[in-house]
Amino acid sequence: MHFPDNIPVDFTNFILITLFSLLIGLEQRRHHFADKPGSLYGTDRTHTFIGILGFILYLISPKSLLPFLFGGLAIMVLLAIFYWKKIEERKQFGITSLLIVFITYSLTPLLYLYPIWLTITVVVTVLVFTELKPQFRTLSKRMGNDEFLVLSKFLIISGIILPLLPHQIISQVIPISPFKIWLAVVVISGISYLSYLLQRFLFPQKGIIITGLLGGLYSSTATTIVLARKSKASQTSPHLIVSSIVFATAMMFVRIYVLSYIFNEKLALSLLVPFVVLSLLSFLLGWLILRFGRKGETADLKEANNKNPLEFKTALVFAGLFVLFAIVTRYVLQYYGTHGLNILSLVVGVTDIDPFLLSLFTGKFAISLHAMGQAALIAVTSNNVIKLTYALGLGSIQLRKSLLISFSVIVVASLIFILI
């Protein structure tokens, strides 16, 4: 931040420290307004004076920092006495307010030694996290026993295993590096984990439309099966279920395009128009079905994507399929060319297409971007036909007309892009 040259830097920093300390103190007063007197070490004025004290003691000797350190030690002794009395008289053990005092005291060296945006970030973080105390309590109550174990798993596969893997391709038969294989696992797990968190904490009621949108981020095929089965077991409007299935397909187009952009930016640029058009078309069809269909009550889908997607067994199966499709794709291209690749793309639509598409996006195959894009479109089109088959076979009769119309439009539009 630039200030006029005729204003001393120390004066500007003194104003900023005073203002930041006062804001923290005012927030402490507001947050503890209903508490009994004497339950806090101090609020607005106390925090302001502590910030000013830290400013003075730092400026006295900014190199040795001895006055600043002794001042911090004196405050620590006073806080220790206060905390001991607080425990003795009030049986209260919280130390958050005391830690905020130390943060306030430490703002001056932070402001002098680092850019001002860092100090502002610290102040804002303190204010926000203090205000979010009730929300954190609510969140902790809603978290299951294994939530932190799940988070630890994701950190292990993304932050520990991934950086340790080599970037060289395994062999000519498997033209993919271990790093890219596991990166694909991390990306897919990350998308499914995000979908899981959104459903678990932001949309706990899991309305059908939300289930379709978020389920499509993880697996549109699995979401279609769950929704179709639910149509026979509930009184939910068929139009709600069909629109949710179509929304899941729209999210599939979004998910696959994001994956292509992450692993092959040039291919993503060539797929931009077809995938944007197909996703928008799917969203439009879902909205039209929802808008003009008969109204019905939404039902909760407790079976939909409740399972956590970060099981290591699932990750290993995905990695195995990823390598398998990389080998098969290379073999097909070597002996049957792009025509064989198109047939393979049509066949894999019956299964989970993500491993195949990621092997296509990441592998070093001697084919053009046009051929890769065409194979991707064939795979998603085949998968949409399979999803339609699942929905027609597993869902109620009332779904069939809307399903046939909506998926026929999507498939025909996909075929047009394939032929182009």
Image (spheres, rainbow, N blue to C red):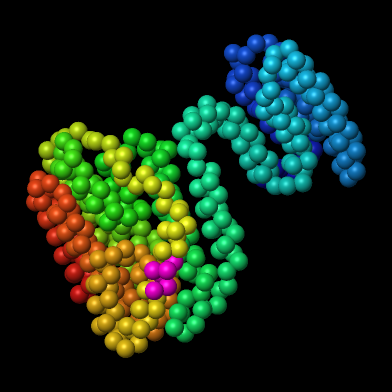
Question: Looking at the image, which is closer to me, 311 or 343?
Answer: 311
Q: Position of residue 33 (x, y in %)?
A: 60, 15
Note whether residue 247 is visible: no
Among the 4 quarters of the image, the one containing residue 270: bottom left
Quadrant including the C terminus: bottom left
Q: Which residues are magenta?
A: 319-324
Q: What residue is drawn where x is 56% and y is 74%? A: 167
Please tell me whether residue 394 is drawn above or below residue 65 in the rendered image: below
370 relative position to 7: left or right: left
Point out residue 20 in the picture as x, y percentages from the top left corner.
Answer: 68, 31
Main SS of residues in magenta: helix
Residue 412 visible: yes
Rendered image quadrant of residue 349: bottom left
Percent x, y of residue 373: 31, 73
Q: Residue, x 68% and y 11% (percent of image)?
A: 37
In the depicted structure, whether residue 144 falls above or below residue 184: above
The image shows residue 9 at horizontal and vertical percentages of: 77, 41
Q: How many marks?
A: 0
